[in-house]
């Protein structure tokens, strides 16, 4: 029987339960423990690339989510596309614990979750031309000007994504900060074809991520795009375009989140 969980604490859920977050189901159903998967990627190589075939036990298209938070998008995508490998990373161990537990409890053997910085993961562990899709939902805007240097979407990071994607690979981007959005469009355009979406994602109409759901609750405008890697660019041209792009030195307005909860 499919029961609705009254709590969002993963440990209190029972087989057959649906887990909810802000009244919206988290994709998938909790399985019997014997069917759980082991999705934590605890040990990254000391040096050298990750071997994706060894990691997943197969060769398959690979979807990467950077800054995955509590994992809602990766869960949804991995359930919908069992034929794809999924890697979800975030720098915050607390949110990675939630994402890992949720993927485990849903038996998602096509998912691996790791605590890692986005730049480090792409540059150290992924081979050139190895990733089919990169998803980034609501990259941390960092409202304090002293933290502007921590913003992930720099020209160098965009060039790094370009190099790790396959021919025709895609970057899915979303934010509720217009100033960050305008910046991303400007610095992505030299290396990516840029398509903006005017509607929510068809597969996740209630929100693709926790932050999206919070933003919808606040009636904020959400900016979404699918960017396709441009091909035929020489390395020197990419370097020139990257060096001539501005750094993310814009001012971000502070926004108060109405219902920040401890539980993810
Ligand atoms: C605003 S939250 C959005 C989380 C989730 N994507 C969502 O939409 O609900 C930004 C996330 O990015 C993570 N993050 C920030 N900088 C990062 C980096 N350099 N590498 C990986 N993750 C990062 C944060 O820990 C946080 O979980």
Image: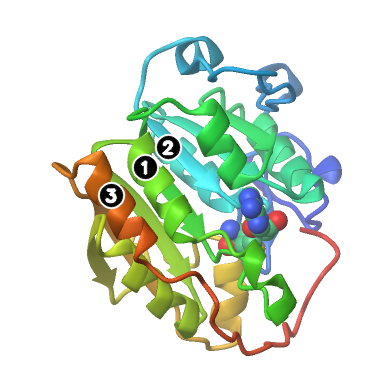
Q: Residue at x 74, y 25 (%)?
A: 42
Residue placed under numbered mark 2 in the picture: 63
> Which of the two labelled residues, at mark 2 and mark 3, occupies the earlier sequence position?
2
Rate crowding at label 1 as few (under 14), some (14 to 19) or many (20 or more) other CA atoms within 10 Å: many
User: In the rendered image of this protein, does residue 58 appear above or below residue 29?
Assistant: above
Task: In the rendered structure, find residue 238 and report the number of the disc placed on it.
Answer: 3
Using residue 3 as the reference point, say whether residue 154 is left or right of it.
left
Cα gap from disc 2 to disc 3, whole angstroms: 23 Å
Q: How is the image coloured?
A: rainbow
> For the residues marked 1 and 2, what is the alpha-carbon distance in whole angstroms?
5 Å
Residue of label 1? 133
Residue 31 lies, in percent from the top left, at 67, 30
Tell me, yes or no, whether the two marked residues, 2 and 3, touch with CB atoms within 8 Å: no
Judge depth for marks 1 and 3 and give the one in front: 3
Q: Are marks 1 and 2 in contact (CB under 8 Å)?
A: yes
**Relative image position of residue 260 (x, y in whole percent):** 79, 75
Q: Indicate the quadrant where residue 263 lies.
A: bottom right
Distance from disc 1 to disc 3, alpha carbons, whole Å, reads 20 Å
Image point (32%, 30%), residue name: 129
> Residue drawn at (60%, 85%), measured in percent from left and top?
252
């Amino acid at each position: 029987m499919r029961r609705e969980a009254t709590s969002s604490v993963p440990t209190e859920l029972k087989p057959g339960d649906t887990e909810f977050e802000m009244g919206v189901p988290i994709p998938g159903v909790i399985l019997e423990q014997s069917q759980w998967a082991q999705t934590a990627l605890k040990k990254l190589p000391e040096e050298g690339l990750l071997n994706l075939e060894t990691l997943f036990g197969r060769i398959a298209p690979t979807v990467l989510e950077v800054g995955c938070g509590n994992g809602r998008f990766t869960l949804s995508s991995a359930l919908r596309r069992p034929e794809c490998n999924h890697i979800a990373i975030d720098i915050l161990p607390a949110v990675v614990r939630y994402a890992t537990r949720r993927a485990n409890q849903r038996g998602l053997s096509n998912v691996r979750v790791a605590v890692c910085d986005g730049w480090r993961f792409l540059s150290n562990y992924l081979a050139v031309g190895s990733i089919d899709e990169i998803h980034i939902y609501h990259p941390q805007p960092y409202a304090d000007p002293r933290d502007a240097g921590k913003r992930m979407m720099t020209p160098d990071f965009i060039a790094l994504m370009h190099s790790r994607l396959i021919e025709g690979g895609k970057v899915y981007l979303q934010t509720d900060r217009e100033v960050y959005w305008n910046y991303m469009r400007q610095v992505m355009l030299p290396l990516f074809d840029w398509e903006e979406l005017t509607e929510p994602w068809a597969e996740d109409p209630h929100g693709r991520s926790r932050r999206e759901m919070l933003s919808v609750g606040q009636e904020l405008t959400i900016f979404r795009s699918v960017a396709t890697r441009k091909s035929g660019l020489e390395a020197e041209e990419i370097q020139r375009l990257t060096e001539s792009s501005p750094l993310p030195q814009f001012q971000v307005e502070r926004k108060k989140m109405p219902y920040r909860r401890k539980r993810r």
